[in-house]
Image (cartoon, rainbow, N blue to C red):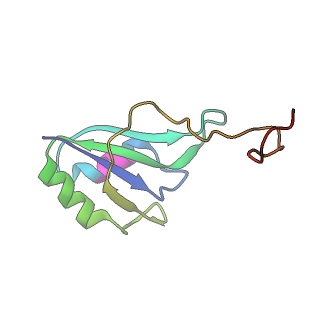
Amino acid sequence: MSINIYVGNLSFDANESELKGLFEEYGAVDTVKIISDQFTGRSRGFGFVEMQNREEGLKAIKELDSKDFAGRALKLNEARPKTSGGGGGGGGRRDNRGGGGGSRW
């Protein structure tokens, strides 16, 4: 069974091949994705590493969490599954008139 690992506090200069090399010391890596800003293309400072073997991934999390990588202390944990439906929510009015308080008309 595979494991998806959240990798936070990445250097903005880190690249996917360097990150893959770091995790390959612990086992086979399926995918590496550093998340970038959709408008600027610049790294957002976090990413995900998917490893084939769950036990190897858990060992990588344990040993690499808080380890210095490209000048920053990594923050690692098992990634939470995506929730369906995407973002959204919020509600409320956007016209700064507030809400509630009865009818005006």
Left or right? Give the position of 101 relative to 9. Answer: right
User: Which residue is drawn at the image coordinates 55% and 47% (left, top)?
Assistant: 44
Residue 69 drawn above or below residue 85 = below
* In-image side of 76 versus 30 (left or right): right
Q: In which quarter of the image is residue 61?
A: bottom left
Q: How many labels does the image show?
A: 0
Q: Residue at x 74, y 46 (%)?
A: 100
Percent across and percent down for residue 32 are 35, 40
Q: Is residue 88 magenta?
A: no
- On-image quarter of the C terminus: top right
Q: Main secondary structure of the magenta part?
A: helix
Q: Is residue 61 left or right of residue 71?
A: left
Residue 101 percent location from the top left of the image:
77, 48
Vertical side of 84 occupied by 98: above or below: below
Magenta range? 18-22
Residue furthest out toward the right: 105
Q: Which residue is drawn at 83% across and 44% down?
A: 96
Residue 64, image quadrant: bottom left
Quadrant location of the N terminus? Answer: top left
| Residue at image location 20% in from the left, 52% down from the top | 57
> Percent from the top left, x then y, of residue 60?
23, 58
Of the pair 60 and 19, the residue shown nearer to us: 60
